Image (cartoon, grey):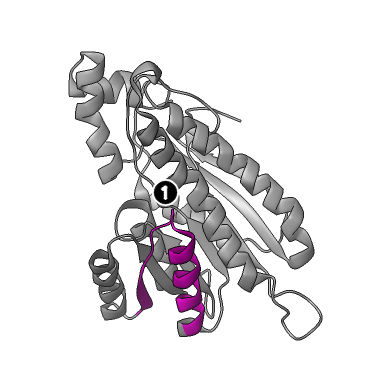
């Protein structure tokens, strides 16, 4: 079994969906996991489930748009577990509207969570990953951003989401160059549509906005560019995150991996 024994992972948006699946899989492979979420009770619940299953987890309240909350939450994780090896920047929301109807407040909210949150959590993590390990080298680490096929493609009604997810590619690529001297590498996972609560919420919203049925949204919008008409699963994404966290070198640093049943082939 691939091992993360002795590693500590901080995962944002980990009380549900993709973040929760990654946290559970990492814990099964030996990592201590910090369940960071804006909802403390939800984070604590997932941490308790992981601990009850024999893993090691800690719930952390974290609003990824707040500099103080991110810095304090990250420091809490290091105080509890003694180190930080892996950051999964996963927290996200979705708001859909055509550009001409998009409220500026909603635009700013989307970029704050997806892109500012990626920056703030990265900066907080690097302050620990860049520390010396006692041998003249940095401790190092791995930063994985949850991008999307929309890091490469665009869809109607999702301007700020697409803009933010494109921005994560730039952040990851810059980190790959800056982090190399400190043994830090970066990656972006780019899922297709996964039936998380975030996506389930979009189906009726898009049906109403586009004037079509929910079945048509699934078939003709979400899955129309896949090769087989199949949703990507949370397990697919969790396994990809495990692969990247255990890859033995920096050969993949700065790269994105599209996990989408053939939608957008690089």
Measuring 21% from the left and 13% from the top, which residue is drawn there?
A: 211
Q: Quadrant of residue 84?
A: bottom right
Q: Nearer the viewer, residue 165 or 232?
A: 165
Q: Is residue 188 above or below residue 225?
A: below
Q: Position of residue 101 (x, y in %)?
A: 33, 19
Above or below, 87 relative to 18: below
Q: Position of residue 257 (x, y in %)?
A: 57, 43
Q: Is residue 235 above or below residue 229?
A: below
Check disc 1 and report the residue beneath it.
236
Element carrying mark 1: helix
Quadrant occupied by the C terminus: top right
Q: Quadrant of residue 244?
A: bottom right
Residue 42 horizontal/vertical position (percent): 24, 64
Whether residue 261 is visible to the viewer of this picture, yes or no, is no
* Front residue of 97 and 180: 97
| Residue at 32% over, 60% down | 38
Q: Which residue is at 40% across, 27% downward?
A: 158
Looking at the rendering, the stretch of residues picked out in magenta corresponds to 55-79
Q: Residue at x 34, y 60 (%)?
A: 20
- Residue 195 at x, y = what percent? 29, 41
């Amino acid at each position: 079994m691939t091992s993360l024994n002795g590693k500590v992972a901080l995962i944002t948006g980990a009380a549900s969906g993709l973040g929760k699946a990654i946290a559970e899989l990492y814990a099964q492979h030996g990592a201590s996991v910090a369940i960071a979420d804006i909802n403390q009770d939800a984070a604590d619940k997932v941490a308790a489930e992981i601990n009850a299953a024999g893993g090691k987890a800690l719930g952390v309240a974290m609003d990824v748009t707040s500099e103080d909350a991110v810095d304090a939450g990250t420091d809490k994780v290091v105080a509890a577990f003694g180190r930080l090896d892996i950051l999964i920047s996963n927290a996200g929301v979705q708001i859909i509207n055509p550009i001409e109807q998009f409220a500026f407040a909603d635009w700013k909210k989307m970029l704050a969570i997806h892109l500012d949150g990626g920056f703030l959590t990265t900066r907080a993590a690097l302050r620990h990953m860049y520390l010396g390990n006692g041998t003249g080298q940095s401790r190092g680490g791995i930063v994985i951003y949850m991008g999307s096929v929309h890091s490469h493609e665009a869809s109607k009604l999702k301007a700020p989401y697409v803009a933010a997810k494109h921005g994560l590619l730039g952040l990851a690529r810059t980190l790959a160059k800056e982090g190399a001297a400190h043994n830090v590498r970066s990656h972006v996972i780019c899922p297709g549509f996964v039936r998380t609560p975030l996506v389930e919420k979009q189906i009726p919203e898009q049906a109403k906005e586009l004037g079509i049925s929910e079945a048509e949204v699934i078939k003709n919008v979400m899955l129309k560019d896949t090769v087989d008409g199949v949703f990507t699963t949370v397990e697919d994404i969790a396994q990809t995150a495990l692969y990247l966290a255990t890859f033995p070198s920096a050969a993949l640093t700065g790269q994105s991996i599209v996990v989408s049943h053939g939608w957008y082939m690089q």
